[in-house]
Image (cartoon, helix red, strand yellow):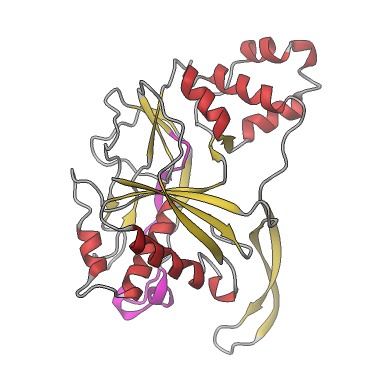
Amino acid sequence: MGDYTVHITLKSPIVTEFQSDTLFGHICWAIRYLRWKKGDRLAEVLASYKPGSEPPILISNGFPKGWLPKPVIPPVTQEVLDRIVKSDNRIGKSFIIKSIKKMPLILKEDFKKLQETGITPTSLFEILFERYKGGVPEETCERVSVQHNTVNRATGRVESGLYAQEETFVSPDKGEFEVYLKTDYFSEEDLQRIFDFIAKAGFGKDKSTGKGHFDFTIEQGIDLPQCAAPNAFMTLSSYIPKSGDPTDGYYTLLHKYGKLGGSFAAGDPEVYGNPFKKPLLMFAAGSTFRDPDVKTGKVYGSLLDEVHANSAIRHYALAFPLGIRLGETK
């Protein structure tokens, strides 16, 4: 499959995170609205997701430039922690230790070192502690709780109540994200048209009020640290295994309450007045799964059906797998 990296630079605050299933939904609406091919191209794309066949497009989450999700594996043992940090210095370094454990991301250059040595709780903590023993880095993004007026949808008037909504703000030099794509179905020109539509229309919640607008460029190739002899994979997307996919691993769960976009968001008759999908549990990016048969091109997950009363509606739940060498974890 052709490899592409979409470089996104935010021009406004954003409410919705760049998760693969949400990105796929925006791609589908772009295909539907652009209509650059005779017939129903969206139906054609969705029908191309068949068990055992190469998907027309594989998409990752969006990550801050230069970062990847931290692999989800068991925590380092207290014995190893005392050896690395030194037991007499553990109290003084407690903030750094807690910060490392909570970090959702890891620098690509540090992940590359893990790919060379193998990923274990010890190797992961050693690399991160060496990186941050002098102090933890500043956040690349800041989540801020913003107060909004409550609007009566029947009258269109502002009411007395307030509600809070978390929005992500970034400084001009830190608002860059990377999304990885694999496709032989779409040309680079197709991808340019699709992401140009999304960039101008806005991404995610409250895009009609200026949220989620961005500039972008598309580059051929994907710069990801590879492993010479993988025995597992880490997903770079939100993921639900299909029957037969490996489930021996370590993971973080996402509770997804999907809402339809485009004209369906207002309860179009085509969706029987219901803009919501059925709730789903998904594995978050960074989750790791052992698979002795892991190889480039192997497909994990599927395009789910039966997620809504309208059977034509699907949910993107494929992994974007990155081969890794997972060591013994106790």
The reply to whether residue 111 is visible in this rendering is yes
Furthest-bottom residue in this view = 155
Q: Going by the image, does 277 lie left or right of 110?
A: left
Q: Is residue 250 above or below residue 151?
A: above
Pick whichever, 182 or 68, lies toward us: 182
The reply to whether residue 277 is visible in this rendering is no
The quarter holding residue 277 reads: bottom left
Q: Going by the image, does 330 lie left or right of 89?
A: left
The quarter holding residue 245 reads: top left
Whether residue 280 appears in magenta in the rendering, the answer is yes
| Residue 41, x across and y down, in percent | 24, 68
| Residue 284, x across and y down, in percent | 46, 42
Q: How many marks?
A: 0
| Residue 62, x across and y down, in percent | 50, 50
Pick whichever, 247 or 194, lies toward us: 194
- Name which residue lies at 34% across and 53% down: 316
Which image quarter is the N terminus in? top left
| Residue 43, x across and y down, in percent | 23, 66
Whether residue 129 appears in magenta in the rendering, the answer is no
Pick whichever, 149 or 228, lies toward us: 228
Q: Going by the image, does 54 lie left or right of 273?
A: left
Pick whichever, 119 or 240, lies toward us: 119
Q: Is residue 214 above or below residue 62?
A: below
- Name which residue lies at 49% across and 72% down: 201
- Name which residue lies at 47% across and 17% down: 329
| Region rendered in magenta | 261-287
